[in-house]
Amino acid sequence: MRPEPTGEQRELQEAVRGLLSREVDPDRLLRWENEPAACDPVLARTVAELGWIGLGLPTASGGGGADLSDVACLVEECARGLLPRPLLGAIRSADALATLDPADPLLPDLASGRGRLALALDEPGGRDPRGWKTALSGPRGARVVDGEKAYVPDAEGSDVHLVAARDGGSTAFALVDRRTPGVSVQALRGFGGDRQGHVGYRAAAVLREIAATDEALARVQRRQAALALAEMTGGMAAVLEMTVEYVKMREQFGQKIAVFQAVRHQVADMGTTFTAARHLAWQTITRIAAGAPRDVEEASAIAWVGQAFKRVCWTAHHLHGGAGFVVEHRLRFHGERAQSLCIRWAPEAPALREIAAALLD
């Protein structure tokens, strides 16, 4: 468990908060939503130069060599400050590749921001690798991938796709250049403003295979879920803080609405929900960072934290009234990200099935 950040983590949080408070605001986020890159290139270069993307990568690959807890601490603060989704995705994809192969030659480009990687993991039929139809074939040195991947983050804006596939009866990973013949992207707009795509691979040439197993895929998925938990606690912290400030300022019937008991009860519920969610999230993050096996507590965190984020956002919208629903308000971005994160990285139904199975065993 990580009840409080370390001194170094606190310094990192303060640096992230200072930069994002200066460089990210609703007006810029709205403008970036309509730009092809979905973020400011100057901010992207700054983030890469500060080492945020490569924080958890090996030092030999130009990274910071930090563990998952440090990366989650960074992601939590980035989510609090609404770092554009493509840059959060860059941190995620770099971590996934380093988890599979800490010596992959693409990692230095990812750490420096020169390269962009998309995670092509899920398929239209689901997330269970046993049901995947995407497959590798062909002789060594001339391998190709055929199939379809769904809801690939930054599918069109990336340079390379990390494709999870079947190779015979086992799980395999391959790096595929997005521009290679046989790769087609159907662009999608995610609920949280993130750019996604359905990607078709038709005899698409493989740049490089990565030796992997079902266990390696599980490690990647667990780390991605841990980073999602950090994103959600960061968003919740921001929503709770802005709501407390708002009710102390907003007047109704000639007085601040914070004096009304019903408002106080709702804010108190938000606070206790956030405290419980943060405890569960960081208990799970630190367990995954330490290499502990998956257990029902991890499923409990996934089932609880995502729904807690949505409840906190809903109460905040209620207390803000119409102000919280306008597109120029920061609360709108957090509310959309809450929905997106729950769907993409912390779906409630599979976690509840796992909890029920453990209780009934």
Image: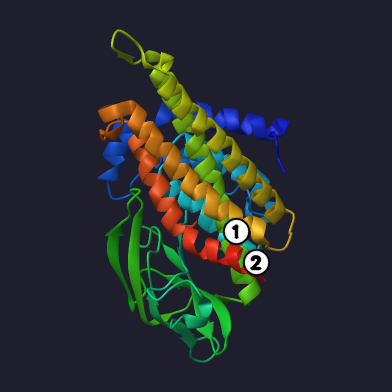
**What mark, if any, has residue 102 been given in the picture?**
none
Vertical arrangement, residue 144 with respect to residue 198, above or below: below
For badge 2, the amino acid type reads: Ala
Name the residue tied to disc 2.
Answer: 358
For badge 1, the amino acid type reads: Ala
In what element is the residue under mark 2?
helix
Residue 126 screen position, x and y as percent: 43, 73
Single out the mark in the foreground, 2 or 1.
Answer: 2
Q: Residue at x 62, y 33 (%)?
A: 12
Residue 272 screen position, x and y as percent: 56, 33
**Image check: 132 left or right of 67?**
left
* Mark 1 neighbour density, 10 Å: few (under 14) some (14–19) many (20 or more): some
Name the residue tied to disc 1.
Answer: 299
Q: Residue at x 49, y 44 (%)?
A: 308
Vertical arrangement, residue 285 with respect to residue 134, above or below: above
Residue 163 screen position, x and y as percent: 48, 72
**Image check: 315 left or right of 184?**
right
The CA span between labels 2 and 1 is 10 Å
Q: Is residue 110 visible?
A: no
